[in-house]
Amino acid sequence: SNAALIVQCAARRWQARRVAKAKRQEKLQADARVEATVRIQSVFRGNKGRAKFNGVKEEHDEYEQRRMAATKLQATARRRAAEQKVDTLRSAKLDTQSAAANTIRKNWLRYLYRRRYVQLQGEYRLHEDSIVVIQRYARGFVVRTRLWR
């Protein structure tokens, strides 16, 4: 009876271990299925998130490209406007300087020619008698050549 109890106890232990091993195996398989499911979901969600990110990134890159193009256009337009303004200012300054230079040159030349004119008048007054004599002979020559024709 003690031996029967030992055999029964061993048989129940063996059976309990077999059941425990089967349950453990079943639990491990269930855990593996859950883990695989989680991994599949993780991969799917990762791919979905990367696809969404790539779409958003493309939109952002396109927006940045358009913004940079607009900035470049604005910079070009502003540069041209500034160049035109500078050209206008330079032209006005050059015109003012040219007018000033012309006025100075005009006054200088007027002074030189006036001085030369006064000098020539003085010479003319010195040689007025000689000039009259030369004119008299020239007019006489012209009259005689007309008469001889």
Image: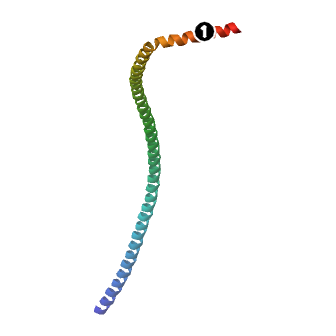
Tell me which corner region of the image, top left, top right, bottom left or bottom right, holds residue 15: bottom left
Q: Residue at x 59, y 9 (%)?
A: 139
- Res. 31 image quadrant: bottom left
Q: Secondary structure at mark 1?
A: helix
Which image quadrant is residue 147 in? top right
136 w.r.t. 48: above or below: above
> Taking 87 as reference, is 50 above or below it?
below
> Looking at the image, which residue sits at the far bottom?
3
Q: Quadrant of the N terminus?
A: bottom left
Which residue carries the number 1 mark? Answer: 140
| Viewer-nearest residue: 88 or 17 | 88
Q: Position of residue 71 (x, y in %)?
A: 43, 40
In this rendering, the answer to whether 118 lies above or below 36 is above
Q: Is residue 55 above or below residue 23?
A: above
* Quadrant in which the C terminus appears: top right
Q: Could you tell me residue 132's position as x and y percent?
A: 51, 10
Q: Is residue 148 left or right of residue 98?
A: right
Direction from residue 4 to residue 149 in the image, left or right: right
Marker count (numbered): 1
Residue 10 x, y percent position in the rendering: 33, 87
Q: Position of residue 144 (x, y in %)?
A: 65, 8
Q: Residue furthest right?
A: 149
At x 38%, y 81%, the residue is: 18
Q: Residues within 10 Å of mark 1 (few under 14, many from 20)?
A: few
Amino acid type shown at disc 1:
Gly
